Image (cartoon, grey):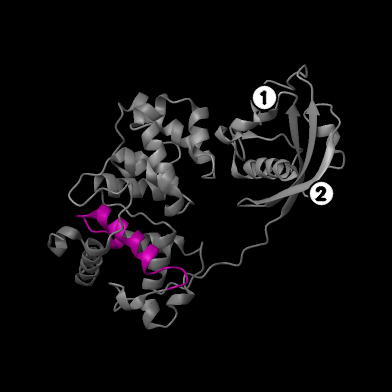
Amino acid sequence: MSPRTMAEQGLSPKREAETHRLLAWYDRHRRDLPWRAKPGQVPDPYHVWLSEIMLQQTTVATVASYYRKFLELWPTVEALAAAPREEVLKAWAGLGYYARARNLHACAKVVAEELGGRFPDTQEALGALPGIGPYTAGAIAAIAFDRRAAAVDGNVERVMARFHAIETPLPDAKPRIRALTAAMVPERRTGDFAQALMDLGATICTPKRLNCMICPWTEECAGRRAGIADELPRRKEKAERPRRKGVAFWVERDDGKVLLRERPDKGLLGGMMEIPSTEWTARGSTHPEAEAPLAAAWQRTGKRIEHTFTHFHLTLDIWRARISLEAPLPARDYRWVPAATLNEEALPSVMRKIVTEVTSRRTSRR
C-alpha cells in the first residue's frame, strides 16, 4: 500500500495500521475471480456491476458460470440493453430472485440509452439506478471507481461483528456495522479494501470454521480476545416459514408440446415462464379442476415437488392431461413449447423441478 499521512486518510494510527495489514494480506492472498481486475488493471464498471448484481444472495461458485455466459452473450452494457428481456430471463434461469434479472435489464437500458453507456461513478448516483441498493452502490463505487464507499455484504457483516465484538443480533446490528466499516475505509485502494474484507470473510473468517491463526487481524480482533468470535454475529431467531400448497398442471399436446404460462411482471417470479398451477395457499385448492388452464381429463400423477422460497415453503402436486392439436390456447400469456426445448425456457428452479419430475417418470417407464 502506498502510504499516506493520517490526516490525508482520515484514519487514526490504529485504524491505519489495521488497514495496512489487511491490504498487505490481500496482496498475497487475493482470490482470482472471473470479474476481478488483475493487479494493475483498471476495473471495468460493466463487469463490476454485472457480477455484483449476480452475487446478491448467491454464492461465488454459482455465479462464475453465469457471469461468463452473460459476457459471451452480451459483452457490453449496450449489447445487454438491446437484448430482448425474455432472452435475459432465459440466461438468468437458475440464479433465483428473478426481480434481479428484470432490474438488470432495466438498468442496462438506462445506462445505455440515457447515460451514454457510462455508469455513474458515485454511490448516490449508482443507488438511483434500477436494482442497485446501498450495498451494491457502495461496492461498485469502491471497486470500479475507487470512491471512498463502504460495501457491507454478509461476509463483511460477519467479519466486522467479530472484529468489534458486536453482540447485538442481526439485523438490528446492521446500522452500527455499516458505520464502523465506513470509518475504516481508506481514501486510497478503496476497491481493494472492499474486496479484501469480502475475501477475509469468505476464506478465513468463515461462518463455522474460523482460522484465526492466519488472520491479518487476529491480534486486534475483539471477538477473538473475548472468546466469542465463533458465536458472532448473533441473529434473531427466525420464525418458521409458512407452508403453501397447490396443484401444477402438466398439459401435453398430441405433438409433444407442453403448455407454459408467462407470469405477470409484478410479484414473485415476475416475467418468468411457468407450468400453470392453482393459487398457492395455506390450505391448497379444494377444487383444482376449476383452476386448471383448460378443460381436460385430468389425472393425478401421485408426484409432487417441494421448493423453499425466502418467505414460504411450497408443495405442488402434479396433475397431467393430454389434449388434441385443435385445443386453443387459454389466453394470450400461454404458449405451447416443445418438451425437448423446455430447458431453454426462462423457467425458475421450482418449475424446473416439475419438468424433471415429469420427464424422469416418463423415462423410468421405458
Q: Nearer the viewer, mark 2 or mark 1?
A: 1
Residue 203: say if magenta. yes
Disc 1 residue type? Trp
Q: Is residue 160 left or right of residue 310?
A: left
Residue with the most extreme front position: 366
Q: Which residues are magenta?
A: 183-209
Q: Above or below — where is 205 with respect to 9?
A: below
Residue 264: x percent and y percent? 63, 31
Residue shown at the point (52%, 34%) measured from the top left = 89
Residue shown at the point (62%, 50%) measured from the top left = 309
Dot 1 falls on a residue whose secondary structure is strand
Residue 304 circle label: none
Disc 2 residue type? Arg
Q: What residue did someone put label 1 on?
A: 336
Q: What residue did someone put label 2 on?
A: 283
Residue 116: x percent and y percent? 30, 26
